[in-house]
Image: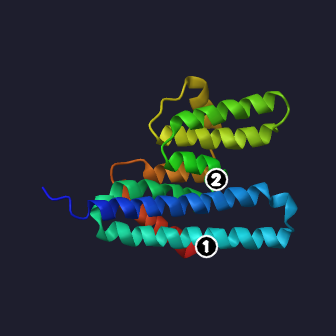
Amino acid sequence: MSSRGLSETNKLQHNLEEQLDRLVAQLTDLEECKDELDEEEYEETKAETMEQLREFNLTLSKIMSGNMTLVDELGNMQLAIQAAISNAFKTPEVIRMFVKKQPGQLRQKLSELERDAKIGKLSQDVLNQQKIEILFALKKLGEDLNPSEAHFLQSHATVTMKEFEQITGDSSTSEKVLEAAASQLKFM
């Protein structure tokens, strides 16, 4: 069996992952520097980053339609991009861990958030929002949630997250992801 094209496929996948990491880092940096920017500058920079995510999503769609060796990995990346575009996730760090399939780091982040909330370093609203995102990401990664986590997620999940779960929930995920991405981009 020939491995022709395997290194190119791996390099393309690596480059795409780096591009996604860069865009997510850009969103993270923007949120961290939000207080240092005036409202107009913040909104303009965020809009530019979101446009770059949309363009990246279109590129992934084109690649997925022509190169079947990358469909699974690109499908996961596209789900993460859809989440960012649709605002199902608001925390870039959670998006990054979801894309890289890092349930251990997600669990650690959740523990840190809960600790910060207990000592008053984090508001309950921020804790709830990020806890929902982390639990949702863990669930989508196939991790088992304990009963209290499952109940929390069930009672606090946003409409956007529930729609996102419906899109990605069955065996024909690839086709539905492509359709959903195309319809989202038309309305944005």
Q: Is residue 187 left or right of residue 33?
A: left
Q: CA distance from mark 2 to mark 1?
A: 16 Å
Say what secondary structure mark 2 lies in. Answer: helix
Q: Which residue is mark 1?
A: 51
From this view, report whether residue 152 is shown above or below residue 73: above
- Quadrant containing the N terminus is bottom left
Q: What percent of the width, then of the height, locates residue 160?
A: 60, 53
Q: Quadrant of residue 28?
A: bottom right
- Identify the disc placed on residue 92: 2
Q: What percent of the width, then of the height, locates residue 183?
A: 49, 70
Specify the amino acid type for callout 2.
Answer: Pro
User: Mark 2 vs mark 1: which is more N-terminal?
Assistant: 1
- Identify the disc placed on residue 40: none
Q: Is residue 125 left or right of residue 19?
A: right
| Residue placed furthest toward the top | 147
Give the residue displayed 43% in from the left and 67% down from the top: 60
Specify the amino acid type for callout 1.
Answer: Glu
* Front residue (pair 138, 92): 92
- Quadrant containing the C terminus is bottom right
Residue 154 in sight: no
Give the residue displayed 36% in from the left and 58% down from the top: 174
Give the residue displayed 47% in from the left and 72% down from the top: 58
Q: Is residue 170 left or right of residue 51?
A: left
From this view, report whether residue 83 is shown above or below residue 54: above
Q: What percent of the width, then of the height, locates residue 112?
A: 70, 32
